[in-house]
Amino acid sequence: MLCTGRVSPEPGPGRIIPDFLYLYIMAAILILFGALSIIVFIVTTILVYNYLVQRNQKTENFLFINLFIFRYLKLYSEFTRNETGRTGPLYYIWLISVNIALVCFILIIVFFDKI
């Protein structure tokens, strides 16, 4: 059956979702994924900070954690590479969550522009 985007008059499993609902559903999904990735970003940032504090690395005040996150990630990567020979998992989790949040934000702007 060819999907035309029109709503069939009869209710049931063959009913097609109207075109305007696709944008709302996609926007809701993007907001959900974006919010989850921001939560993961915040948690991994705090975990990287705590890792460096446990290693007695000089860190700035906790309130300025996002100003120095790139330096903290570099130190975290160096410490874990020296200890285990590989970069720690928090580095990649942080990097992926930031990228997902950025992509979701851009796509939300695109979809809300059409709504």
Image (cartoon, helix red, strand yellow):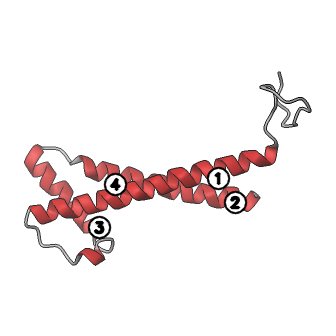
Q: Residue at x 13, y 56 (%)?
A: 79
Image quadrant of residue 66?
Answer: bottom left
Quick check: can you spot residue 80?
A: yes
Cα distance in 3D space between marks 3 and 4: 10 Å
| Quarter of the figure that contains the N terminus | top right
**Residue at 89 percent of width and 29 percent of height:** 10
Q: Quadrant of the C terminus?
A: bottom right
Q: Marks 1 and 4, how far apart in space?
A: 23 Å
Residue 40 image point, x, y percent: 38, 54
Q: Earlier in the sequence, mark 1 or mark 3?
A: 1
| Contact, mark 1 vs mark 3 (Cβ under 8 Å) | no
Give whichever of 97, 81 is nearer the camera: 97
Residue 8: where, in percent of width, then height?
89, 32
What residue is pinned by disc 3?
69
Q: Which of the marked residues, 3 or 2, is nearer the chain's N terminus?
A: 3
> Are the residues tagged 4 and 2 within 8 Å (C-beta)?
no
How many angstroms separate mark 3 from mark 2 (CA)? 31 Å
Return the residue found at the far right. 9
Q: Which residue is mark 2?
A: 112
Q: Are marks 1 and 4 in contact (CB under 8 Å)?
A: no
- Label 4: element kind: helix
* Residue lying at the far top of the rendered structure: 1
Question: Label 2: few (<14), some or many (≥20) within 10 Å?
Answer: few
Disc 1 target residue: 27
Q: Quadrant of residue 108?
A: bottom right
